[in-house]
Amino acid sequence: MPPDPAEDQPSYEVRLTEPAEMEVEAAYLRRMQFGRRSAERWYAGLARALETLAVFPRGFPLAPESDALGGNVRQMVYGKGSSAYRILYRIIEPDSEEQGIVRILHARHAAQQRLGQSSDNADDM
């Protein structure tokens, strides 16, 4: 049997920041309008998606607003169409004493304005 590529990868701990926790909770509560089962399925799917970051944190591209957030911010899109959420995160590399960390910074609906963008584009002219 071929070796599992995940075994060669360091494992990272996935941690949500307080803003990310609040955004996930708010998204869950919005999903409750479609019923408890819908909200629970959404949350379980999000938890599974976040678990993939523990093994493959570099599997997703840099976020468009990475520079505005201090650089090296990646995004994973969870869901499809009008249910899509952008999970913004930063990778903290492991060292000899500690496990690496994937710090979830935000969980934003894909339709929301990008972080760092002004709501008035008149300044861009």
Image (cartoon, grey):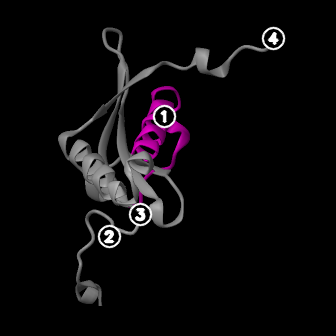
Q: Does the CB distance between marks 4 and 1 fall below 8 Å? A: no
**Which numbered dot is residue 48?**
1
Q: Is residue 37 above or below residue 66?
A: above
For numbered disc 3, what is the local secondary structure? loop
Give the residue at mark 3: 110
Residue drawn at (50%, 49%) of the image: 61
**Magenta part of the protein: which range?**
40-64
For numbered disc 2, what is the local secondary structure? loop
Give the residue at mark 2: 113
User: Is residue 74 visible in this depiction of the protein?
Assistant: yes
Work out whether mark 4 precedes mark 3 in sequence or the reverse, and give the earlier one: 4
Q: Cα distance, mark 4 to mark 1?
A: 26 Å
Q: Does the CB distance between marks 2 and 3 fall below 8 Å? A: no
Q: Cα distance, mark 4 to mark 2?
A: 47 Å
Q: Does the CB distance between marks 4 and 3 fall below 8 Å? A: no
x, y percentage for residue 102? 36, 32
Q: Cα distance, mark 1 to mark 2?
A: 26 Å
Q: Is residue 77 magenta?
A: no
Q: Cα distance, mark 4 to mark 3?
A: 40 Å
x, y percentage for residue 83? 46, 61
- If the image is split into quadrants, where does the C terminus sit? bottom left
Residue drawn at (49%, 38%) of the image: 49
Work out whether mark 1 precedes mark 2 in sequence or the reverse, and give the earlier one: 1
Give the residue at mark 4: 1
100 left or right, relative to 117? right
For numbered disc 4, what is the local secondary structure? loop
Residue drawn at (33%, 66%) of the image: 114
Q: Quadrant of residue 96?
A: top left
Dot 2 amino acid type: Gln
